[in-house]
Image (cartoon, rainbow, N blue to C red):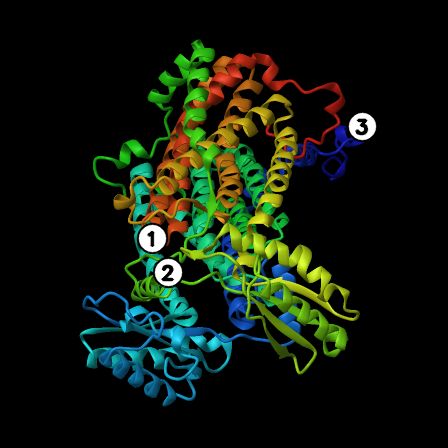
Amino acid sequence: MQLRDAPSTTMLAGGSPPNLLSEKHVTADHQRRSAAQPVTQRIACWSARHRIIALVGWLVMVGGAVLAGHVYGTQSQPQYDPGQSGVAERMLHRLNVVTPPTETVLIQSKGPMPAPTLAAAPAMTGHVREAASSVVAALRALPGAATDIQSPFGSAGGHMIGAGGRSALVTFQVAGPHSQADTRVVRALDAVAAIQTRYPDLIVAETGGASVDRAATAMLGRDFHQAELTSVPLTLLLLLLVFGALIAASIPVILAGTAVMTTVSLLAIPSHWLPIGQGTSEVVLIIGMAVGIDYTLFYLRREREERAAGASFHDALRTAAATSGRAIVVSGLTVMISLAGLLFTGIDMFTGFAIGTMLVVGVAVVGSLTALPALLALLGPWADRARVPFLGKGRTRAEQSRLWNTVVGRVVRHPAAWGGLAVVALAALAAPALGMRIGQPAINLPSSLPVVQTLAHIQQDFPGGPAPAQVVVAGPGVQSHAMQRAITGIETAAAAGGPIHGPVTVQPVGHGRGMLISVPLAGTAAGGNSSAAAISGLRALRGRILPGTVGNVAGVSYAVTGSTAGRMDYRSALRSASPLVFGIVAALAFVLLLMAFRSLAIPLVSIGLNLLSVGAAYGLITVIFQQGHLEGVLGFTSFGGIIAWVPLFMFVFLFGLSMDYHVFVLSRIAELKSRGLATADAVTGGISRGAGVVTSAAVIMVAVFSIFASLSTIDLKMIGVGLAFAVFIDATVVRGICVPAALTLLGERSWYLPAWLRWLPKGISLDA
């Protein structure tokens, strides 16, 4: 008994029992190894071990976001123009001034008319007069839908009758709250349509702010619904070709779709205090599907590659998290930094874009690090089930690309020749962008829409000058004698001719707290854009006339808005903000890549190549949309310019999206380099091993963006064509030729980090 209870020699020596010592040693060793693992690897391993908890947590987050969006509801805040126009709009908002949408009904003879002989004394032909009378009577019978009806009959209606009496106009304002105008205008549209049936030999049609907005909303809704119905099956089909198995192909679509669903729902919360426009959801859909599928592809391909090399499921997930997982984090941060550049424009429209896209990228990164490894651990070998016949067995192995191995091998052997040729080609593609002109079409809708056709008929028969400038004045001094003298001064300047014309009209607003002064500008309004004379008149009004009149009145503040002012301020804001946005995005991306790769050369090369690919996309949209090539194929009519917001949005989006491929490829190269390979060998191996996933992701993105090129509005066509082309160039010429050429020419200097920068943290370093 004593022998049995006696302590062992190990215990007598002050040690622990052998089994206890072993357990403590293993635990400590596991803790040391866990602490040495990257954060992404620890998160993924935890999610894989607790896969049910991780997946339930992800579903709870998605469901909670949907519920929160439903409970809070979307509340669209007003979007103001930048600059002085926005100041005037905010003043009107504080004065509770809401201008209801104006609608115009055109009554026009379809047949040829004799030469205009009634221009001096306009008078309608009998049939046109009869139809115009019917329109006026029908609108007056709709007191809850139409108000302030202006008829061509009477002493002041001469300007509403076209030359020769072949056409006439009836105008009215949509009654009721401004937010319900699109709905309330339906009654007037129905009434006008009924009159059209009674006069088949005439054109009796309505257009205006509310009817155009209603038609545009319905058209965009159909377009995006069709795009969604097309893009999801197309994406799934391409993923089937990539993976060869239905279950594996469904994983990227599911994760990207839930990320988009979560983000769109969560946008209801900031919409209560920030201007989140209607187009934000569509932009979130484009970017969310793009990055969500990219990140999932990166992860899945690396996990398959490791399993094909003989690793267990757990080890394959761990390696994928340590490599592709870190690349996803760096890529996601870079995309978010790029998109955050939109916040520095000062333009309300970009605020919603920036917040929504940054949020969806962040959600996609979280899903790739948590839900994806949990789902893969839960499915196990089942992820490769439901294989496509004659394709599935080969696609379930992630193999090195022979094609890209051959191409990169040749580039590495002759880097200067190949790299120089590629750079010259990209510069040639970008050259047309030097002549890019920023503009705006009269209406960004296809000419096939009836409201657009009616507007064209009105502009043809009733050509006029630009819309008047609207001077908003507010403050206790608006009722003073000095203010009356200031108005007289404006009228005197208008009567003298020159930059502004008469008649100057004054309307008290806000129960006497302010006034709205309408000042006609010189020039013409061709194609919806103000002429140089109108812009010159606006500058004279703002810079000389108003400071010398209203500016001398004590106790008032003023600002000028209107269509000409809004366009000029918008372009001015873009011109001044673009260099700032470009600089901030490039600088922050440089810092992030510097920390990720601990190299001075790689961030500089990355930024330079990204600018080349963006420039090539700019050149293409300039050739197609500004110069008017491929109008018939793409279904648009060129207005001789590029829509103002498109270049800036394309830059931040492409700069971020191209980093997806760039970071992934460079991380593979850095991984091989850290294993002792020479730079040339690491470049060849890294690009050829990562080429499969980069090519697959690029093909999917090109296909999805090409769908948006088929939509109706010209700005979405520009975005679709530009993004599709840029992604194609980025995944082929840039990643396959420019990157290996640059790194080979730099050699070991590619990984040089000056001593004075070695204090940089290694928290997100991609060094293996």
Callout in the foreground (1, 3): 1
* Location of residue 263 with respect to 214 vertically, above or below: above
Q: Residues within 10 Å of mark 2 (few under 14, many from 20)?
A: some
- Residue 638 in percent (x, y) is at 35, 47
Q: Quadrant of residue 32?
A: top right
Callout in the foreground (3, 2): 2
Do the residues bearing badges 1 and 3 touch, measured as CB atoms within 8 Å? no
Give the Cα separation between the discs numbered 3 and 2.
82 Å
Q: Residues within 10 Å of mark 1 (few under 14, many from 20)?
A: many
For residue 316, say whether it is visible: yes
Q: Amino acid at mark 1?
A: Leu
> Could you say which is closer to the camera, residue 249 or residue 197?
197
Q: Amino acid at mark 3?
A: Ala
Residue at 51% of width from left, 14% of height from top? 744
Residue at 45% of width from left, 17% of height from top? 419
- The residue that mark 1 highlights is 711
- Residue 309 in percent (x, y) is at 41, 26
Circle nearer the N terminus (2, 1): 2
- The residue that mark 3 highlights is 13
Q: Helix, strand, or loop for circle 1? A: loop
Give the Cα separation between the discs numbered 2 and 1.
8 Å
Q: Which mark is residue 220?
A: 2
Q: Which mark is residue 608?
A: none
Please state if 172 lies on the left or on the right of 331 as rendered. Answer: left
Q: Quadrant of residue 10?
A: top right
Q: Helix, strand, or loop for circle 2? A: helix
Q: Quadrant of residue 25?
A: top right
Q: How many numbered circles does the render carry?
A: 3
- Residue 29 in percent (x, y) is at 66, 32
- Residue 656 in percent (x, y) is at 53, 39
* Location of residue 181 with respect to 83 vertically, above or below: below
Do the residues bearing badges 2 and 1 touch, measured as CB atoms within 8 Å? yes
